[in-house]
Amino acid sequence: MSSGSGLLSGVRVLDLGIWRPVPYATQLLVEMGADVIKIEPPGGDPMRVFPDLFAILNAGKRAVAIDLKDSTQRGAVLELARDADVVTEGFRPGVVNRLGLGYDDVSAVNPTVVYCSVSGYGQTGPMRDVPGHDLNYQALAGIVEPRATGAEPVVGRPPIADLAGGVYAAMAICAALVRAGRTGEGEYIDVAMADVLATWTGPLPKLRLDNGDVMRGGAAGYGAFRTADDGWITLGVLAEQPLWLALVTALGLSDLAELTFVERSAEQEALNAQLATAIAKLSRDDTVSLLAAAGVPVSPVLGQTELVDDAHLTARGVVRRAPDDRTAMSHPLLYKRHPSSTPETVPPLRLGVEALPRWQRKA
């Protein structure tokens, strides 16, 4: 159970979600102070097979295994929903309605409830019943589109559909809670992970320069560059002339300093080749130190094992030491007056209706 100091202290969440998207959303709420009761199927959330990941997504919650196909057990969950501020679920569209735990069922006994469904393709539309996982939603939303004709699709490391869906769900829940607190009106939220990602990718207009030329993608001084020690750095120079000047001066390429952005865009391949040659003579960390001191937007490409030792992330408190001295991550936002918490206790799976906690009855 969460502490009483966070922004969502006192908010009661009944979480019917398993796997990653919904538990990630409710974990963000836990870290902001919400009290989350997690309902798992008999045998537990399938994510428990990955105990470290399960802990990241569910620490600080209370968990009970309930067979929602059993009318008595389902009725006990609906009774618990009567006193929840928020109910979340991540079943395929229509499943909770057939179980008698959909929004209409819950709002009939709890009119002010904020009810959030998270799914791959949403509760409506021709693909609503198609099964999927993170990569499928990315593909539909144009995320993995090849960067060039004939190239292979680009598959990133993070499951961004799951995580983005969880973040948007948490954001919408918080907004709906504000509304419910002011007006007494509940809300039903339909989060489709593919929808979220689609709004990130398109349709975006082609970028035109002030001379009318269409940018071909990329820019001189923007991208990843290999260093002498086989490391990588990224540069983030775009149209800003002072940043270009700082970059080429620091790398001993002052003859390129007066090129305008339009000129740089027309010759970006050749210019990036010159930058690459200069950077390839330096180590990764030396390159970062040199360019950062010159005021260039630069960062090292860190591996997952390196980022946990990064001085900046450690100073921010994003990377921290857990009580057992392992490295762990914290809530990603900082709050001045109502700080977040990072629970450590993984909820044991309690069994049956008799193990269901009880909230104080709403007035």
Image: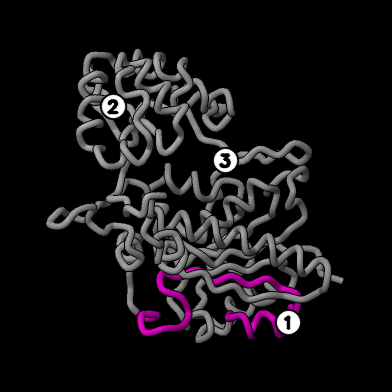
Residue depicted at 47% across the width and 83% down the height: 94
In the image, farthest residue toward the left: 150
Residue 128 sits in which quadrant? bottom left
The scheme the figure's colours follow is one colour
What residue is pinned by disc 2?
A: 232
In the rendered image, residue 264 lying in the magenta stretch gets the answer no
Q: Is residue 159 visible?
A: no
Q: Residues within 10 Å of mark 3 (few under 14, many from 20)?
A: few
What residue is pinned by disc 1?
A: 109
Residue depicted at 41% across the width and 49% down the height: 210
Mark with earlier residue (3, 2): 2
User: Which numbered mark, 3 or 1, is in the foreground of this view?
Assistant: 3
Mark with earlier residue (3, 1): 1
| Identity, as a three-letter code, of the amino acid under mark 1 | Val
User: Which numbered mark, 3 or 2, is in the foreground of this view?
Assistant: 2
Residue depicted at 46% across the width and 83% down the height: 124
Residue 224, given in percent of the width and then of the height, sits at 29, 33
In the image, is residue 168 above or below residue 239? below
What residue is pinned by disc 3?
A: 332
* Closer to the camera in the image, 120 or 268: 268
* Closer to the camera in the image, 358 or 259: 259
Q: Is residue 207 visible?
A: yes
Q: CA distance from mark 3 to mark 2?
A: 25 Å
Q: CA distance from mark 2 to mark 1?
A: 57 Å
Circle 2 SS class:
strand
Q: CA distance from mark 3 to mark 1?
A: 35 Å
In the image, is residue 80 above or below residue 145? below
Circle 3 SS class:
loop
* Closer to the camera in the image, 127 or 85: 127
Instruction: Please give the range of residues in magenta.
Output: 101-129
In the image, is residue 66 above or below residue 95? above
